[in-house]
Amino acid sequence: MRFTRVTHTPFSHRVGRYHFQMAQAKLNTPVQPVFTYSLQSFYARQQEWVTELSHSLSRLYRFSAELDQSAREFDPDRKNSAINGRIATSSHPEVVLAEALPGAEPARCELTVYSLASGQSNRSLGALPGEPSPVRAGQHIFTLSIGDQEKELQFYSDPNDTFVDSLRRMAGVINRSRLGVSARMETSGEHSPWSLVIESIRTGAKQAFTLRDTSGHSIRALGLDQTKTEARDAELLLNHEHVRLEQNQLLVDNSGVKLTLLQADRSQSILIEVAKDTERLLDQTKTLVHRYNRLFAFLREHQDVLSTQKLETFDRIARAADQELISFGIERSGNGELLLDESHWRTVVDTDFSAFADAMKGLGRQFREEMTKIQTTPLGSFSHSYSESQSANPYIALSWSSFQYNYATAAGMFVDMRF
C-alpha cells in the first residue's frame, strides 16, 4: 500500500488555527505570545504514526483480500470454485483421457473405441532442390472440392521453375482459397526430398476433398491426386450404444465429463468415473482456516492502531457457526482461532457432502460481506485522526494522530500558559 493514500496535513493546517487564536489574544489582552518554538519532535512522531498506520492498513487489506479469495472457493455460484470441483479418472488414460466439468454429479460410464476420427491428407511426389519441374510452363487451372463447396484455382508455371518452386506455388494458391484445407512444404532432413502435404483442417468423413485438373496437368504431374489418409469419423460403443463422431472429443451429458479419444482399441473396455475433488476441497478448507486465524491474530495485535474499527464481526461469525462447523471437524479454540481435524473432516464430508456445502456457503458469504465492508471503508475512518481533523475545535484530540494541538497546549510550546 502506498503511503500517499493516508491523508497528510501540511504545516499550515497544523498551526494556522493557533495563529488565529494568538491574534485574538493579542487584540484583547496585553499578553504577548511565544513566537519561538520547534515542531520537529511532533512532526517526527506524526510521521511515525502515519507510517505505522499505513503498514497496518496495507496488511489489513491484503489479509482480508486473501480471506475473501478463500471464501469464494465455497461459493456454489462460482463455476470453478473448489466446492464445484470434480475429478474424472480413466481406467486406460493412454486410450481415453477424461476431464470432469465443474459441478458434475458422481457417475460412471463404460466405452470401447473402435476407430478415431481423421482428416484427409494428400502428399505430392518428392523433389530434391534444383530438380526440374514436371509442370510445363504456362497457366494451369484445377478445382478443389470439399463437402458441397467447389472452387476453381489457377497458377502460372514459369519456364525456369524447379520442382520445389512448383510445389511452393501450388501451396500458396491452396492456402489462399480458404476452403478448409491447408498446404505445407515438408522434408525429413537437410538433404532429403521436399514434398507438398495437403490436409483438411478438421476431422470427419465430411471433410474429404478432391483435386482435379481442368486445364493443364499440374495435379497429375505433382502427384497430388493420390490420397494418403482418408477422412473418417470416430466410432465407439458408449454405455452399450453405438456412437459416430466427427471429432475425437465428446461430452457425456448425463455425467458431465469430457472424453478425448487417443487410440483405437477394440479389445479394451474402458471405465470412466466422476467424483468430487475432495483433496482440493480439503486444501481450500485448510487455507480458509489459516487465513482466518492470521487475520484474527492481526486484528487482536493491532487494536491500538486500528482504534475506531473493532472489526469483531469475524469472531461473531465464527461463534455463530460453531454448531454447524463443529460437526465437520472445524471448531474454535480457547483464544478464538479455528482448528481443523482433517480425519474427522474427511469422514463427515465423504458421508454428507451436501450438508458441508450448505454450511460453508453461509459462512463464506458472511466472510465476503465483511471483506467488502472493510475494503469500502474510507481509509481515515480507521483512526481517530479522521474525525478529529474535521473538527472545528483544534484542541479536541487525545491521541498522537490528532496533530498534537492538545499536547502542545499542555506543554506551553504554542500557547503562553498565562493565556
Image: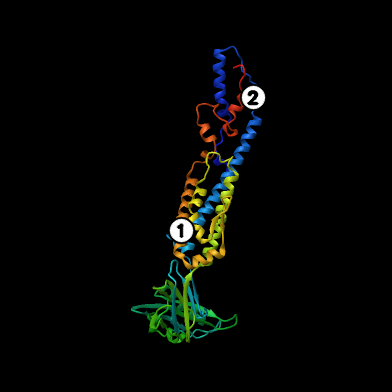
Viewport quadrant of the C terminus: top right
Q: Residue at x 51, y 55 (%)?
A: 69
Question: Circle 1 is placed at which residue position?
Answer: 359
Q: Which label is found at residue 305?
A: none
How are the colours assigned in the image? rainbow
In primary-sequence order, the first of circles 1 and 2 is: 1
Residue 107's image quarter? bottom left
Give the side of residue 355 with respect to residue 344, left or right: left
Q: Position of residue 278 (x, y in %)?
A: 51, 67
Question: Circle 2 is placed at which residue position?
Answer: 411
Number of residues whose C-alpha sits closer than 10 Å to that of mark 2, classed few (under 14), some (14–19) or many (20 or more) = few
Q: Residue at x 51, y 63 (%)?
A: 281
Q: Position of residue 139 (x, y in %)?
A: 41, 80
> Is disc 2 placed on a helix, strand or loop?
helix
Q: Is residue 159 visible?
A: no
* Residue type for callout 1: Ala
> Is disc 1 placed on a helix, strand or loop?
helix
Structural distance between the alpha carbons of marks 1 and 2: 57 Å
| Contact, mark 1 vs mark 2 (Cβ under 8 Å) | no
Between 119 and 117, which is closer to the camera in this rendering? Answer: 117
Viewer-nearest of labels 1 and 2? 1
State the count of labels.
Answer: 2
Is residue 16 depicted above or below 64 in this figure? above
Is residue 326 depicted above or below 254 in this figure? above
